[in-house]
Structures are given as structure tokens and as C-alpha cells.
Image (cartoon, rainbow, N blue to C red):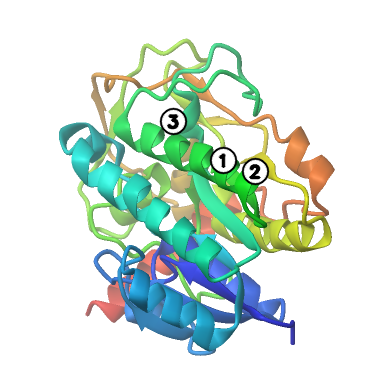
Amino acid sequence: MREGTVLVTGGAGYIGSHAVLALLDAGWQVVVVDNLVTGFDWAVDPRAKLVVANIADDDKVRAAIREHGVIAIMHFAGSVVVPESVSDPLKYYRNNTAASRSLIESAVAEGVKHFIFSSTAATYGIPEVVPVREDSPKQPINPYGMSKLMTEIMLKDVAAAHPINYAALRYFNVAGADPQGRSGQSTAGATHLIKIAAEAATGKRGHVSVFGTDFDTPDGTGVRDYIHVSDLAAAHVDALDLLIARPSENHTMNAGYGRGFSVLQVLDAVDRVTNLTIERKLEGRRAGDPDALVADNSAILAALPWRPKHDDLEGIVKDALAWERKLAERQG
């Protein structure tokens, strides 16, 4: 058992619940803070302690830090739907930026030494060069990306002023589910392609919309870097070890595989795995969708011992489908 406890915000959600599993499996004690607005209490592994609270509730968060001897925070809580951020920007600046400020202040006040932040490739906006490096221009084109970038800036400033170090991991397209079937993406109305395709393959949807066929890509559909959620969770555990070993260092790293697949390639993979043909509806492209968004992941590979174990598109699809079927049984 590791010394100290890790507090995971948003640990009842999709990525957070997988990070909880990875931490527990690595021997950490874990306390989850989640308001259960989009998360599920049953998604929290029973080995972890769940505190139902908003991360901006300073009293509850600080009490949890003190009671459990928290030495590090992994921060996943927040709102993540890009189109909603455009229509309701204030929600995103409250839930992502202002609430993160409260959480960081609680961490500093209670002497938490390490902070890992769930950031996003949306901080880059529409990149001029692909694959995207961490030092590429940060030009978010929606409030979601901007709300995350503002939190990165806060962390940089706070780490310069206080005895806390941080790692910000900029996720690309997270997909799949725990290979052991312990967690997966359960949120209704998800906007992630592989989740949507899995719903179509299990009869929850009649078709999959393909937004844009005129991109500057080999088949005209958008290309994205899909990373398995369990690989992403493992990267967080390795990042925590790095922060502990090197308390004077901060790191901002892309979390992706460094190669992309188009929308049609993903749907073809789902067809192969299921022996079905998912109906595809071709629609116009959405405002602000880049042609391609692929990570240059050389920094994370250099900084961490982390190496992907699930870098296989069909494997990602299989895990997502297995979870979708399990979810259907749970929902009756």
C-alpha cells in the first residue's frame, strides 16, 4: 500500500472511474469527490471512498483532504460537451474554470503537494501542423477548450508561487472501456464517435451521423487520435509517480497514440468487429471541426515509463461494445 491518499474529482464519471481503478490496482488509497450530476455512484470501485460534493464546496473538499491524508489530487470533474459550451459558455467557465480555481485553492490551503489535471487537445483549436506538439499555438475555438486552458494557466502560476507541482495531460479522443468490464462510458447523450457507434451496433441508435465528407484527409472524413481509456488512466498513475519523484518539476503532455483514424475507418472497424453494417448518414461538417487532430506523443514517452497496451482500434471497439452490452443489461 502506498503512503497517503489520492483524491480523484469526477471519479464517478467515465475517465475518472478508470483512473480510480488504475490507482487502486497500483496500491494507492483513493477518495472520490463527485456531485453525481453526470457520474454514477455504482461506477466508483468499492475499494474507494465516495464523498458526494461539488468540488467548489471548499468545506467538504478540505475536510476530505484532511480526513484521508490526501497528498495528491487528480482532477477530472467538469463539463465536456463542446457544442454545449458554445451555447452555454457560462456553465463551462463556472464548472471548469471557477470550480477548478476553488479546488486548487483548497489544495494549496491544505498542503497538497501534487496535482494532475485532465486537460484537452481542444486547447490547440484548429492546429496548423499535425501531429500537434505541446508547444503548438494554443488557440481554443470554443469555451470548453478555453476553460481548460485557463485552468492550465492557473496551475502554472500557482505552482510558481506555492509548494505544489502539477502535470496537465491534454487528451485526444478517449474511447473504449475497462477490459475487465469494471467501468466504461455510461453517460447518456454522449458525443464520442466510438460510443455512438457502439450504441448503434447494440440497437440503441438507428444510425451514425458522419459530419463532413470534404475534409482534407484521405477519405474526406475527420481524422482523430483515439486513445484507450485504460491506457490514459495508466498514464495518470505514472505522471503521479513522476511528480512525487521530481517535486520541482511540472509537466504538460499530450496523451494520445500519435496516429489517427478517420470517421469512416472507425465505423468500418465497428462493422468488422460486429459483422454488422451500421447505417451512416452523411451530413454537413460542424463548425470548428479540424481536418485532423493527432498527438505528437514524444514528450509523454520521454517523461514517463508509460507505454500504450491497448493501441489497437478493433480492440478499443471490442471493449466499448462489451461495456455497451453490459450497460444495456444494467438498464434492463
Mark whose residue sits in front, 3 or 1: 1
**How far across and how far down the image is residue 76, in percent?**
46, 58
Q: Earlier in the sequence, mark 3 or mark 2?
A: 2
Mark 1–mark 2 Cα distance, whole angstroms, equals 5 Å
Mark 3–mark 1 Cα distance, whole angstroms, equals 42 Å
Crowd around label 3: few <14 · some 14–19 · many ≥20 (10 Å): some
Checking the image for residue 16, the label placed there is none
Dots 1, 2 in contact, CB < 8 A: yes
Residue at the image position 22 percent from the left and 36 percent from the top: 89
Q: Can residue 196 be seen in this view?
A: no
Check disc 3 and report the residue beneath it.
Answer: 264
Q: Which amino acid does label 1 sit on?
A: Asp
Q: Quadrant of the C terminus?
A: bottom left
**How far across and how far down the image is residue 61, in percent?**
41, 73
Mark 3–mark 2 Cα distance, whole angstroms, equals 45 Å
Q: Residue furthest left?
A: 87
State the SS at label 3. helix
Checking the image for residue 160, the label placed there is 2
Crowd around label 2: few <14 · some 14–19 · many ≥20 (10 Å): few
Checking the image for residue 157, the label placed there is 1
State the SS at label 2. helix
Q: What residue type is labelled 3?
A: Leu
| Left or right relative to 77: residue 159 | right
Residue at the image position 64 percent from the left and 43 percent from the top: 160
Dots 3, 1 in contact, CB < 8 A: no
Relative to the observer, which residue lies in front, 235 or 331?
235
Q: How many labels does the image show?
A: 3
Q: Which amino acid does label 2 sit on?
A: Ala
Relative to the observer, which residue lies in front, 129 or 164?
164
Dots 3, 2 in contact, CB < 8 A: no
Relative to the observer, which residue lies in front, 115 or 49?
115
**How far across and how far down the image is residue 82, in percent?**
30, 37
